[in-house]
Amino acid sequence: MDIYFNNYKLPNVISYQVQRSTRNTKTEYNAEGDMLIDMVNRKHILTVYLGGLRSQELRHLLTITDSIFFTVRFESPVLGQVNALFHMKEQAAETDFVLQGVTYYKALRLILEER
């Protein structure tokens, strides 16, 4: 269950979910009731759950994802190995505790969308 952001292996991956959604779709029906679909492309939406991270790990992760687009590599159950550009759609970080000057964060949920 390895996931890479710009060749950086994400630490503490608990699980992830892969979805493919259709972008720029126009659905119409002709006079006989047949469906007509104008489909432009299918994109991945990747939701990653990370276990507790140290402040240094989180800062490094946020540095990578600060770019608008970055390379993500993961295993898709449908397509196999995926290596594509993504952007961070949603990220949240919640402090868990501080121990000896090191801040630890609760499990994170990252939502990424393919370019």
Image: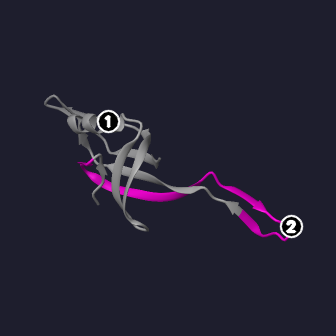
Residue 35 lies in the magenta-colored region: yes
The image shows residue 96, relative to residue 79, as above or below, that is above
Which span is picked out in magenta? 7-36
Q: Which mark is residue 42?
A: none
Nearer-the-camera pick, 9 or 108? 9
The image quadrant that residue 54 belongs to is top left
Q: Residues within 10 Å of mark 1 (few under 14, many from 20)?
A: few
48 displayed left or right of 6: right
10 displayed left or right of 33: left
The amino acid type found where label 2 is placed reads: Ala
Task: Read off the residue under disc 2.
Answer: 31
34 displayed left or right of 107: right
Task: Read off the residue under disc 1.
Answer: 62
Residue 48 lies in the magenta-colored region: no
Marks 2 and 1, how far apart at CA: 52 Å
The amino acid type found where label 1 is placed reads: Leu
